[in-house]
Amino acid sequence: MKKKSVSLVLSSGGARGLAHIGVIEGLLEKGYEIKEITGCSMGALIGGMYAAGHLDAFKEWVSHLDRIDVFSLLDFTFSSGGFIRGEKVFNELRKVIPDCQIEDLNIPFKAVATDITNSREYIFEKGSLYTAIRASAAIPTVIKPLTFEGVDLVDGGVLNPIPVNLIEIRKDRLVVAVDVNAPIKPRPLNHSYTENKSALNALPSWVSDLKERVGGVFPKVKKEKADKKAAKSKNMSFLDVMNLSFDLIQDKLSDLILASNRVDILVEVSRKQCGTFEFYKAKELIELGKEAFFENLEKFDQQNGH
């Protein structure tokens, strides 16, 4: 190829989507130029930050979050639409990275959300970047839907968890897709993050009911025995059933999307790599993403005689 240019597709996946940062860094280190980005949920956030020229600032911010920081960004509510409002984290981000208009970004960018009012995809190609990201990342039953222009928008992963179909297919560009919900074994992480258990133990008593809902945020004090795990699995909460069902649907959709669209390099990260809210593992997840990209790029080069 005369030009090492790429169309990049970034999947949903909560904190696992921090691996997207590592993939972007790997692409740049190898001399590729990212010409276009489409993203869903966390993929929309990372892709949007890069397209706006603020990925380094975002990486610096997220890499310094510990467990208590993550918890403090979760603005809990007892709304029936979701138990997290989803506004506080974006208010904090705006203090570090200003909002901008998608049409003014350095790179063409699209974020996908789901319009549950009209049962269709909602594609953001213009307007507020943060509005697009907030809508795309509204995990059903977890984060409240965003009401925008008279419709309710939720996570784009409901219909399109890895939006390969939104990119422009060109002969002079590679299509690189990153799926952080892959049904593969998790990789070992270097646990360099620190735990502040005393601070966690000092949290208000009402938080205990929420621990199971945001499981990845909180460390488990003791390892459960196999029989206790089995018993627990038989008594899943309504939220557990909803989230596991959503995961299964996403997996099947991702398989169909990837089978139906051209992808030159597919970078996969295990769905079991970490919990949805384990953002305090940022440094490790970013490095993991870069390593996974380099491995798949090497396979691609070998297959194509580069």
Image (spheres, rainbow, N blue to C red):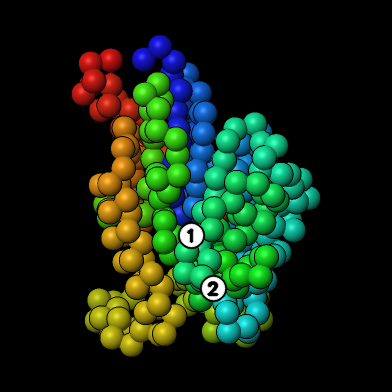
| Residue type at the position of mark 2 | Thr
Whether residue 306 sits left or right of residue 278 in the image: it is: left
Element marked by disc 2: loop
Position of 84 relative to 99 (above/below):
below
Residues packed near mark 2 inside 10 Å, few (<14), some (14 to 19) or many (20 plus): few
What is the x, y in percent for residue 166?
A: 45, 44
Q: Could you say which is closer to the camera, residue 149 or residue 285?
A: 149
Q: Residues within 10 Å of mark 1 (few under 14, many from 20)?
A: some
Residue depicted at 66% across the width and 70% down the height: 150
Of residues 241 and 100, the one drawn nearer to the viewer in this rendering? 100
Residue to which mark 1 is pinned? 121
Identify the residue shown where x is 32% and y is 50%.
Answer: 257
Q: Image check: 275 left or right of 279? A: left
Q: Whole-percent x and y of residue 290?
A: 43, 35
Q: Nearer the viewer, residue 19 or 109?
A: 109
Q: How many marks?
A: 2
Foreground of the two, 77 or 120: 120
Q: Report the residue at 32% width, 37% height from top.
A: 263
Q: Which residue is mark 2?
A: 117
Above or below for 297 versus 127: above
Is residue 133 shown above or below 140?
A: above
Which secondary structure lies at badge 1? strand
Q: Are marks 2 and 1 in contact (CB under 8 Å)?
A: no
Image quarter in which the C terminus is found: top left
- Relative to residue 264, is residue 6 drawn left or right? right
Amino acid at pointer 1: Glu
Image: 241 above or below 218? below
Residue 273 image position (x, y, % from top left): 38, 54
Alpha carbon distance from label 2 to label 1: 10 Å
Quarter holding residue 68:
bottom right
Give the residue at the far front of this rendering: 118
Q: Which mark is residue 264?
A: none
